[in-house]
Image (tube, rainbow, N blue to C red):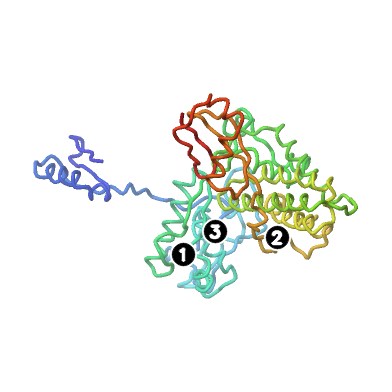
Amino acid sequence: MINSGPFNGTHATSEKGMQNPAIKAVTEWLEQQGIGKRAVNYRYRDWLISRQRYWGAPIPMIHCDVHGWNPVPEDQLPVTLPEDVEWKPTGESPLKLHPTWKNTTCPICGEPATRETDTMDTFMCSSWYHLRYLSPHYDQGPFDEAEYNYWMPVDIYTGGIEHATMHLLYTRFFHKALRDAGITEGNEPMIQLRNQGMVLGEDNEKMSKSRGNVIAPDVLVNRYGADTVRAYIMFFARWEMGAPWDSHGIEGSARWIRRVWTLFTDQTQPGTASPEVEKNLRRRVHQTLRKVTHDFENFEFNTIISGLMELLNEMYKAREAGAAGSDAWSEAQDIYLHMLAPVAPHVAEELWTNYLGKPYSVHQQQWPKVDEAAAKEDMIELPVQINGKVRDRITVAADASEDEIRSAALASEAVKKHLEGKEPKKVIVANRRLVSLVV
């Protein structure tokens, strides 16, 4: 965008804008007319990294009355915070008030000197902690190069929208600065960014103490357990959208977790289920596994919970039909706990180890693979439209040909009634999901 006017005699365009021939031509004309001149505005802002508080990394600088400020010698790093601090109501940093911590010696003359008592803004640490996490005990540099080559760049960065002008900006700056220094590689530290929505108060406003609408998670955890609270947070809204909190809704998640516990701990004796019951159970298990796997990869957590709830109902029906104790039942239990583990980790671990007798831990197991043959439907239901209006639904074999689907649609009594003896001009089978008749 071009911004020209009498205020400063300049007009500015972005680098991308200057690649546009039209903008470039207008810019050159403005310069020729003496109206303005081209300028690049990066909108730089100073970042004051010092904080007058206890928490945060100490700024490793020493002040000497003779030699001024000098960095702490490398062999004396890291500078650690004292643990015997005293908090005063004055609001001053405990480091400044500590009787001994700030006292040291000048690295040049060895005379008494004082440490800097300000600490760094916590963003100074969080901007590169994903690198230090690669090898936290490595002492030959900021990180082990082999670990960096294996793990970086970060697959997915998640955060709130407020991070767009704070942490995300800072961590990208750190990465690019380290890249220019030859320490890191590539232009970006993260491959993908996903912003989560915000959990609002029940009054549909952002939670804050001043509004008095904050929901204390500890109270909910004490009442329902951590797994139930975790599951409800995943379930009550789309992850990227957020929504107002509903204190009554958590009861549904609590009932679901209780039903899971009851099904897995119930000492139902093995029955004799028909092959059809076992086949249907395996179909639903592997269809759910396929959907849950997709939803985990796409951060669609609310539909994961609904899928697990639906599968639990099917498992109860299968148990009543005598499926308990069968190979299909054991497989269903095994896969269900795999899918449950990221949602309700404590309950899943307890059931996996103590009730199914599986080796510790469910969180260390390979993710199960979908048996596509088992997941395949024998029959499918297709809506039938006549001139755009659904008039019937037909059930056909999953592997039925298009001709067989057309014949089934035309044989429908409801379709015949609405055709009123007329021959359709077209019978279209759309992706085996819809039959459309044009009359």
Q: Amino acid at mark 3?
A: Ala
In the picture, which quadrant includes the N terminus? top left
Kindly report which numbered mark, 2 or 1, lies closer to the viewer in this rendering.
Answer: 2
Residue at label 3?
Answer: 57
Q: Earlier in the sequence, mark 3 or mark 2?
A: 3
Name the foreground residue: 188 vs 352.
352
Task: Classify residue 96 by image quadrant.
Answer: bottom right
Q: Earlier in the sequence, mark 2 or mark 1?
A: 1
Q: CA distance from mark 1 to mark 3?
A: 21 Å
403 w.r.t. 391: above or below:
below
Q: Which SS class for mark 2?
A: helix
Residue 422 appears left or right of 36: right
Q: Amino acid at mark 2?
A: His
Image mark for residue 64: 1
Residue at label 2?
Answer: 363
Kindly report which numbered mark, 1 or 3, lies closer to the viewer in this rendering.
Answer: 3
Q: Position of residue 71 (x, y in %)?
A: 46, 66
Image mark for residue 124: none
Q: Position of residue 152 (x, y in %)?
A: 50, 65
Q: CA distance from mark 2 to mark 1?
A: 54 Å
Q: Amino acid at mark 1?
A: Cys
Name the foreground residue: 218 vs 353.
353
Dot 1 alpha-carbon crowd within 10 angstroms: few under 14, some 14 to 19, many 20 or more: many
Dot 2 alpha-carbon crowd within 10 angstroms: few under 14, some 14 to 19, many 20 or more: some
248 w.r.t. 307: above or below:
above
Q: Residue furthest left?
A: 33
Q: Circles 3 and 2: CB distance less than 8 Å? A: no
Q: Which SS class for mark 3?
A: loop
Q: Position of residue 276 (x, y in %)?
A: 76, 50
Query: Residue at (69%, 44%) from the top-left corner?
Result: 231
Dot 3 alpha-carbon crowd within 10 angstroms: few under 14, some 14 to 19, many 20 or more: some
Q: Earlier in the sequence, mark 1 or mark 3?
A: 3
